[in-house]
Image (spheres, rainbow, N blue to C red):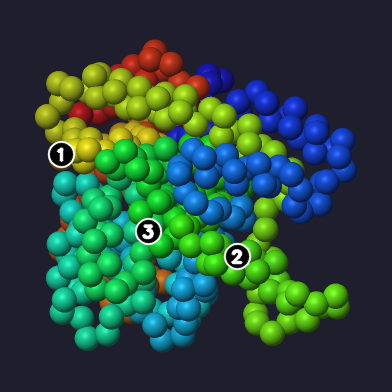
Amino acid sequence: MSKKFFLSAPHMSGNELKYIQKVFESNYIAPLGEYVDKFEESLKSYTGAAHALAVLSCTAAIHLALRVLGVREGDDVAASTFTFIGSVNAILYQGANPVFIDSDKESWNLSPKLLNKYLCECEKKPKALIVTHLYGMCADIQKIADICALHGVYLIEDAAESLGAMYNGKHTGTFGDFGIYSFNGNKILTTSGGGMLVSENKEWIDKAKFYATQAREPFVHYEHVELGYNYRMSNVLAAIGVAQMEVIEERVAKKREIFEWYKEFLCDYDEVEFMPELPNSRGNRWLSVMTFAKTDYNIVMKALEEANVESSPLWKPMHMQPLFRDAKRVVDGTSEELFSKGLCVASSTTMTKEDVKMTCDVIKSCL
Ligand SMILES: *Cc1c(COP(=O)(O)O)cnc(C)c1O
């Protein structure tokens, strides 16, 4: 059986076990301990975020952000439609109503034009916008942030896939009122599962920490006024995170190199189009993504599967999901078209140029 190439397999730095060992030696296996602080510190110093909170998942982090911003039953929350469900589930946790906004062709991410049109015309203003930086590539985030500020809409950046991506030299996740990163199993870095919430606003992060620890009031006994959650990250997982943060720039460089190899090997095929990168931005190319103008992606997927190479269709837009059949939407067909033609291909950072060449030979045989 030949080796399998995954979309984005975990890739350890080598220091993970050493730090886990230290956690065990200190006996701080139980939630919280010095590695949680260290993990938050390293993420802050890397991204430039002012305050950070390590939690169980990115989904939990988004839930906390909505909760702190006061999103509640009956509120509208706008969101990228071209995203993964984890971006938007928390809108339903809060009993709020999602409004899905389509992508533009320049970034494949949320269209500032559609957002602005919607905010100018809507009768009920959404409380917040959740914008995703899809596949690690920057949305037109400065424009989106300006539009949100103009209309008094809170901005939450779902940077789950985009740790290391920058727009105008500033990290994704640091433009919004809140930013969110994921350390789930297949992200560019992983703690096996985990998330991080960041903000410039210390009070908000303190409040999020309060909600994430069962909303316990500051008494000697256990006193509860508000509803809380059990969302904090354990010291063991944070130790993995600290070791992973040490290699983030290496991983971004390798992901970008893998993408360049795909481009190089497929450059003679007009029907192949790659996910664009906005000027003045550096994406992390978490996954290499392409569309086929003529060939059915299912044929390519099947051929890759036979060669032991993992691939996957693009995220099915949220406004097309049965779960959201009644949700409001501002769409123009862009994400539906990308979904109908696109494929994510194996982009694990352990892949060599030979591996990518083999993958491209399989793809070419289908075109
Ligand atoms: C992975 C992902 C999430 C969810 O992250 P978890 O840490 O698994 O909860 C949310 N949004 C996007 C865009 C993702 O890719």
Hey, what amino acid is under mark 3?
Gly
User: SS for tag 2?
Assistant: helix
Alpha carbons under labels 3 and 1: distance apart: 38 Å
Q: Point out which mark residue 93 bears.
A: none
Q: Residue at x 69, y 38 (%)?
A: 239
Instruction: Evaluate if marks 2 and 3 touch, with contact meaning CB atoms under 8 Å apart.
Output: no
Left/right placement of residue 253 relative to residue 139 reads right
Residue farthest to the top?
354
User: SS for tag 3?
Assistant: loop
Q: Which residue is mark 1?
A: 294
Q: Earlier in the sequence, mark 2 or mark 3?
A: 3
Q: Quadrant of the C terminus?
A: top left
Q: Which residue is mark 2?
A: 206
Q: Nearer the viewer, mark 3 or mark 1?
A: 3
Q: Earlier in the sequence, mark 3 or mark 1?
A: 3
Q: Quick one: label 2, few (<14), some, or many (20+) residues within 10 Å?
A: some
Q: Is residue 185 above or below residue 348?
A: below
Image coords of residue 309 (percent x, y): 43, 29
In this orientation, which residue lies closer to the viewer: 97 or 21? 21
Residue 253 image-quadrant placement: top left
Left/right placement of residue 109 relative to residue 321 reads left
Hey, what amino acid is under mark 2?
Asp
Q: Residue at x 65, y 69 (%)?
A: 210
Q: Point out which mark residue 176 bears.
A: 3
Image coords of residue 159 (percent x, y): 42, 50
In this orientation, which residue lies closer to the viewer: 153 or 6? 153
Left/right placement of residue 232 relative to residue 246 reads right
Alpha carbons under labels 2 and 3: distance apart: 17 Å
Image coords of residue 2 (percent x, y): 53, 19
